[in-house]
Amino acid sequence: MTRHRTGPEQRDKALHSPDDESKTDLEGLCRALLRADPDIKDIIQFGSSVYAPDLALDIDLLVTTAAKKDSDVYWDAVADWPVKVDIIVRESGQRIGDWIALGVLAAHKVLYGDGSTIEEARTAIARLMMRHVNVCSLPTDFWRMQAMRQMKYGGISSTVPPLIPSLMPLEVQL
């Protein structure tokens, strides 16, 4: 099976004619994808085609499906589209990459479905934030270590230097 991709002349045409109906005929694009994969749950447009449609060089889509087909199925569905279409296909529940999730949350439009993919992107970003928070904030471990040091040295005194003095409560600072 030969992959049909949009050529540079078609991309240039899209760049130079912002009123091109292919940029606004997103329903037709969704119909083409749904014909190729009737199990699609969500089609989310994101990126520059949402926040700067007149300047966008392509249309970025995040497609969530119940059962992912071969990638050629999706590429063939949009092959003759006059504007370059980038498609990321995932199955429901499959992890969304951090950068994709950020891009989707920054600027998105739900073209088809109930938008549950947006919630999955929010969950992915929340997990990302928690990983960074857990690495950067160690108050429980800090206070546990401080208490162990106090027990070892017989309580708080000026001879027991705090681990990080600026993090100690004011009433405990030495």
Image: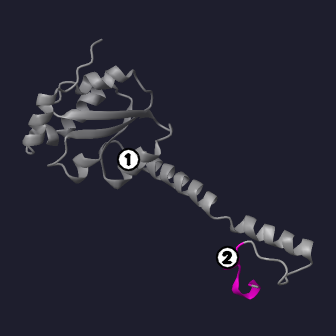
Q: What stretch of residues is rendered in magenta? A: 164-173
Image quarter of residue 111: top left
Label 2: element kind: helix
Name which residue lies at 15% across and 34% down. Answer: 11
- Residue 147 location (% of width, % of height): 83, 72
Q: Is residue 102 visible?
A: yes
Q: Amino acid at mark 1?
A: Gly
- Residue 80 location (% of width, % of height): 17, 25
Earlier in the chain: of badge 2 and badge 1, it is 1
Label drawn at residue 167: 2
Image quarter of residue 166: bottom right
- Residue 145 location (% of width, % of height): 80, 67
Question: Does 169 appear in magenta?
Answer: yes
Tell me if 83 is positioned left or right of 163 in this view. left
Quadrant containing the N terminus in the rendered view:
top left
Q: Nearer the viewer, residue 40 or 89?
A: 89
Question: Does 1 appear in magenta?
Answer: no
Tell me if 104 is positioned left or right of 141 in this view. left
Name which residue lies at 82% across and 84% down. Answer: 158
- Residue 123 location (% of width, % of height): 50, 51
Q: Amino acid at mark 2?
A: Leu
Q: Which residue is mark 1?
A: 115
Tell me if 19 is positioned left or right of 7 in this view. left
Q: Nearer the viewer, residue 94 or 161?
A: 161
Label drawn at residue 31: none
Q: CA distance from mark 2 to mark 1?
A: 42 Å
Label 1: element kind: loop
